[in-house]
Image (tube, helix red, strand yellow):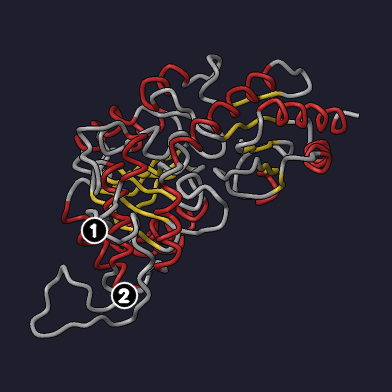
């Protein structure tokens, strides 16, 4: 049975969140429900599963778990991009003459939707740097403001309560992409945001084998809009993927604990290595947003560390030389991964910019491997 949010820590709730009441002889977490139609006699009750596109008990269990952690009502989608699209298009929050504000370094898919779908509909799209002053100057008249904090990939930290107050003073809504932090480190709804969006593909599921996303909201009417869009558009998650995500949730706290510890130790080692420049990690006292991150993220600064090597060639030598680091995109998995972000052409970063996601390996092994790879890269 799900434990009450007011009774136990978030770490404990991740283990129990979304579990149904105990029934003799039944598993703790029921297996995935595979069905198209369900038995449905007589009048239709909106809370009863009748057809998979509208509802599924496996979704409900996982959404209950996410709702507990987010302190809002969660709706699950088949990908992080599906969750983003549901907010930007499906909720129909924006129409001709409305203003949408987002960072110019936001997730590329968000920028794509803004340019390809919102702007042609007459929405004024304002893309500004992830910067306190730029964001606050841009919110005048905004109907919806989108923010990533910490930002990806440059790990800039923005004051959520202050921005929420500014947006609400304009009568707008604030959506936070909380993928990097997760609700165990940062709860956007509690900090004043109206919507919390995440790609569960990353840390939430954490094993690099599922693509999934969700949106959590404070207003139940917003949850109804999201669920209606999911059904209408057919943007529905598979029950097996959702069940795997729920199963993975129980280890989120312990995975984050190790990943954040590893990331901080690695960031400290990189900051002391003069072969590396531009080390970015909110857990470092030298990070310009460190004090804000301490207050806003509860001392957990995420798995992602970024740094720069002189050029793309040395960065690629670094990646090729590693024995432990897997060259791959995405982040938040159990394995340490890294990539040259400039290879995608979607971020204004240097050719030698490395985004690294710390995994669960022994921190001494990761640091030793990084140092050996830096030897090769700088030779």
- Sequence-earlier tag: 2 or 1: 1
Q: Is residue 322 shown left or right of residue 22?
A: right
Q: Which residue is mark 2?
A: 53
Q: Is residue 44 shown left or right of residue 124?
A: left
Q: Nearer the viewer, residue 272 or 315?
A: 272
Q: CA distance from mark 2 to mark 1?
A: 28 Å
Residue at the (42%, 53%) spot, across then down: 247
User: Would you call the spot at circle 2 few (<14 residues within 10 Å), some (14-19), or many (20 or more)?
Assistant: some
Residue 32 vertical position relative to residue 298 in the rendered view, above or below? below
Q: Give the percent coordinates (x, y) of residue 44.
A: 12, 78
Residue 95 seen from this side: no
Q: Which residue is mark 1?
A: 23
Q: Give the percent coordinates (x, y) of residue 345.
A: 65, 50
State the SS at label 1: loop
State the SS at label 2: loop
Q: Is residue 374 shown left or right of residue 354?
A: right
């Amino acid at each position: 049975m799900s434990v009450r949010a007011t009774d136990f820590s978030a770490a404990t709730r991740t283990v129990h969140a979304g579990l149904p009441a105990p029934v003799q002889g039944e598993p703790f977490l029921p297996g995935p429900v595979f069905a198209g139609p369900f038995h449905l006699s007589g009048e239709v009750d909106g809370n009863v599963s009748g057809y998979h596109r509208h509802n599924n008990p496996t979704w409900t269990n996982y959404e209950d778990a996410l709702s507990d952690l987010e302190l809002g009502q969660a709706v699950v989608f088949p990908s992080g991009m599906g969750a983003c699209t549901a907010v930007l298009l499906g909720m129909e929050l924006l129409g001709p003459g409305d203003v949408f504000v987002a960072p110019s370094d936001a997730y590329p898919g968000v920028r794509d939707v803004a340019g390809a779908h919102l702007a042609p509909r007459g929405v004024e799209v304002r893309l500004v740097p992830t910067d306190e002053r730029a964001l606050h100057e841009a919110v005048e008249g905004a109907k919806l403001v989108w923010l990533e904090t910490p930002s990806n990939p440059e790990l800039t930290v923005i004051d959520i309560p202050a921005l929420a107050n500014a947006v609400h003073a304009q009568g707008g809504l604030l959506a936070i992409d909380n993928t990097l932090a997760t609700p165990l480190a940062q709860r956007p709804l509690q900090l004043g945001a109206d919507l919390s969006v995440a790609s569960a593909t990353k840390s939430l599921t954490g094993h690099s084998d599922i693509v999934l996303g969700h949106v959590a909201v404070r207003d139940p009417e917003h949850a109804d809009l999201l669920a209606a869009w999911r059904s209408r558009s057919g943007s529905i998650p598979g029950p097996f993927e959702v069940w795997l995500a729920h199963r993975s949730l129980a280890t989120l706290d312990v995975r984050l604990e190790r990943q954040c510890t590893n990331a901080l130790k690695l960031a400290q080692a990189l900051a002391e290595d003069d072969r590396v420049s531009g080390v970015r990690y909110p857990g470092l006292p030298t990070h310009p947003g460190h004090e804000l991150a301490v207050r806003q993220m509860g001392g957990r600064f995420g798995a992602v560390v970024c740094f720069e090597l002189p050029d793309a060639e040395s960065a690629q030598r670094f990646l090729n030389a590693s024995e432990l680091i897997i060259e791959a995109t995405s982040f938040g998995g159990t394995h340490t991964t890294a990539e040259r972000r400039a290879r995608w052409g979607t971020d204004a970063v240097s050719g030698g910019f490395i985004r690294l996601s710390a995994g669960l390996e022994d921190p001494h092994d990761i640091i030793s491997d990084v140092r050996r790879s830096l030897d090769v890269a700088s030779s």
